[in-house]
Image: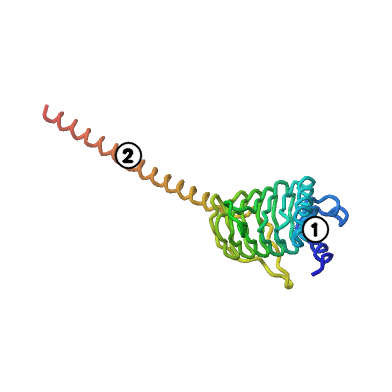
Amino acid sequence: MGWFSTLKRDIEVVFERDPVARSVLEVVLCYPGFHAIVFHRIAHYFYCHRFFLIARLISHISRFLTGIEIHPGARIGRGFFIDHGSGVVIGETTEIGDNVTIYQGVTLGGTGKQKGKRHPTIGNNVVISAGAKVLGSFTVGDNSKIGAGSVVLKSVPPNSTVVGVPGRLVIRDGAKVEDGRVEVDLEHHLLPDPIADTLAALQEKIQELETKIEMFERKDRRDTGLQHLKQKKGKTKYA
């Protein structure tokens, strides 16, 4: 695919995933996420041709203007969309597939100081919600979701949802397919919460135990009262 067709696709995804976008001119002039990806594609070209200083300089200017830091070595597919984007960090050896959406505060980072592949590989049609951290050299499978604020430290199978710190897997259905095109599911606020479910189950169990204890206490008070009454009657008769 040519550079202009890729640019055209980067503009189209803004209209597909952001209901606020009204015109192409507005996207080109007012969307920092779009600016960041355009800067990155230029910087990546220089990086691939071993003009590392120029590539890093373009990346640095992009970070200054947009608040989004993408290392020029990162490989990013078509249809990439950064919504809002402030505080996004994407590391050097990150690989991102097609039709990926990320939100503000996301980090695609590495662990340790080793050389080589140390950042994640993100599959196609993945949604990474605000503040999520994906750290390490592993793969996030196609059609997966990362919940807001999650910290993902190991591989995620395709068609899955990860929530929590550290990230916990919740298997779910894959993305819908309509007219041959994958529909990116942006309902990232409607995610299961296993921690909340566990706490709710514990609360229910505690209430059940409290009810049983209260029943035993009432029964014990009745039995004590009857024993008292029997003792009292026995004393009266003896007198």
Q: Which mark is residue 63?
A: none
Q: Are marks 2 and 1 in contact (CB under 8 Å)?
A: no
Q: Residue at x 11, y 29 (%)?
A: 238
* Front in this rendered view, residue 1 or 231: 1
Quarter placement of the C terminus: top left
Q: Residue farthest to the left? A: 238
Is 196 drawn above or below residue 224 in the view shown? Answer: below
Q: In the rendered view, how is the structure colored? A: rainbow
Q: Residue at x 35, y 42 (%)?
A: 213
Q: Residue farthest to the top? A: 239
Specify few, some or many for label 1: CA neighbours under 10 Å numbering under 14, 14-19, or 20 or more: some
Q: Residue farthest to the bottom? A: 180
**Relative side of 237 to 22, left or right:** left
Is 205 drawn above or below residue 218 in the view shown? Answer: below
In the figure, residue 17 lies in which quadrant? bottom right
Q: Residue at x 15, y 29 (%)?
A: 235
* Front in this rendered view, residue 154 or 170: 154
Is 229 drawn above or below residue 3 in the view shown? Answer: above
The mark tally for this picture is: 2
* Front in this rendered view, residue 153 or 237: 153
Q: Find the distance from the CA under tag 2 to the CA under tag 1.
A: 75 Å
Task: Provide the residue designation for mark 2.
Answer: 217
User: For the residue marked with disc 2, what is the amino acid?
Assistant: Glu
Task: Provide the residue designation for mark 1.
Answer: 42
Residue 185, image x, y percentages: 68, 61
In the figure, residue 143 lies in which quadrant? bottom right
Looking at the rendered structure, the secondary structure element under dot 1 is helix
